[in-house]
Amino acid sequence: MRIQSTAEIPYEAYVSQAIYDREMEALFQGPVWHFLGFESALLGDQNYLTTEIAGLPIVVVNDHGVIRAFVNRCVHRGSLLCIAKTGQISEFSCVYHGWTYDLEGRLTGVAFERGIQGQGGMPPDFNKSDHQLRSLKVENYCGILFGSFDHEISDFETYAGPDIAAGIRRVLPYPPILLGRTSQLIHSNWKIYVENNHDSYHASILHSFFTTFKLNRLTQSGGIVINDAGGSHISFSKRKQEVDDTTYNAEQLRSNKEDFGLKDPRALRFIDEFNDQISLQILTLFPLTVFHQISNSLCVRQVIPRGVDKVEVVWWYYGFENDSAEIRDARLMQINLVGPAGYVSMEDGAVGEFVQRNSSYAEGAAGMIKMGGYDHVSSPSRVTEAAIRGFWKQYRDHLGEDIA
Ligand code: FES
Ligand SMILES: [Fe+2]
């Protein structure tokens, strides 16, 4: 299959096992940065957390102040080494046959290496120092841990570009603390979900909650910012003053068409915590990470491909240690907007599955992404699919035009 331009995307891209296999090798294990978790989970020495990158189990550990990440796979027969979500260890120890590793990933112990009474054991040419866990490069950016399989990759800020890096710093003025997590399995290819996050055009049309309650309309001031590589972007908008006010008046929240209002308006609050009036910022970091600010809900969405037609989204809702009671309450209340059953986000999962159902046996058909032209540059308009084109531009840079 060939992706010749970034204006048309063959549906085959969402159903081909061959393409998925290439993505697993060349893209996800190539020169890209992935979200691993929050530094705040690893503050104690020898604390670890387990996570995944595109279904590959990963363990991240604090080794006397140095954060290290490894594929969570024993070199012997491939068992998981760490099983719990978090914990504390002085060495890795495999449950299957008891092999051990130090926190730098070096194989230190092989059970019955010399056999018993001269019988059995490893052959003389076996040398523990030839074996270590597969390591990732790690960077801590604003209290978020990122990892890459490519040890030659540029530093995180260079990879993201200055505008995207500034957008991340904007929603992370302090190191984040985890408020809670939800997870959602969507029956669509991972790219359909990621494209949806690059799609500033749909938000105020698909999500009637947004429009009805004036959380996000295309008439509000905002724009999109796309990095030079193309695949990372920010879509943002500023809330109109009438719904900014915490002294909410039900009259002011009626939609233009109908007599809608919420009995409990707390989900619509917006406290301008970053002092710039921006009440919505969707930020994608190519290829599998999304940061959102929706009013005062702050979240990192970890996208985990689970086969060609399934994707899991793990929503890491966060706040800060010094949150006031009022802002913490707003963050928790606004979790109702997002996640698997969110007033806003549930439709994204549904439309992704609609597209997936139409992608099999599509007989060479392709979807079009021409809204706003053919380029993938920043713009003050959100009536554009430029950021989706940017995603495909960077995707092709990693995988080539002939992707299967
Ligand atoms: S698989 Fe880990 S010790 Fe055998
Ligand atoms: Fe959406």
Image (spheres, rainbow, N blue to C red):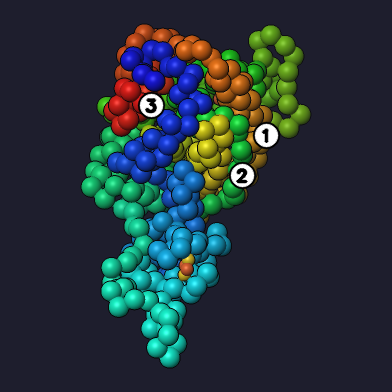
Q: Which mark is residue 341?
A: 1
- Residue 166 lies, in percent from the top left, at 33, 36
- Residue for point 36% across, 26% down: 403
Residue in the foreground of this view, choosing between 295 and 156: 156
Q: To which residue does mark 3 refer?
A: 404
Spatial distance from mark 1 to mark 3, Cα to Cα?
35 Å
- Residue 102 lies, in percent from the top left, at 37, 72
- Residue 61 lies, in percent from the top left, at 41, 63
Q: Which mark is residue 153?
A: none
Q: Of the residues shown, which amino acid type is indicated by label 1? A: Ala
Secondary structure at badge 3 equals loop
Q: Of the residues shown, which amino acid type is indicated by label 2? A: Thr
Q: To which residue does mark 2 refer?
A: 182
Question: Mark 1 or mark 3: which comes first in sequence?
Answer: 1
- Residue for point 48% across, 27% down: 16
Question: Mark 2 or mark 1: which comes first in sequence?
Answer: 2
Residue in the foreground of this view, choosing between 169 and 271: 169
In the image, is residue 258 above or below residue 174?
Answer: above
Residue in the foreground of this view, choosing between 4 and 329: 4
- Residue for point 33% across, 48% down: 149
Spatial distance from mark 3 to mark 2, Cα to Cα?
34 Å
Q: Residues within 10 Å of mark 2 (few under 14, many from 20)?
A: some
Question: Mark 3 or mark 2: which comes first in sequence?
Answer: 2
* Screen quadrant of the C terminus: top left
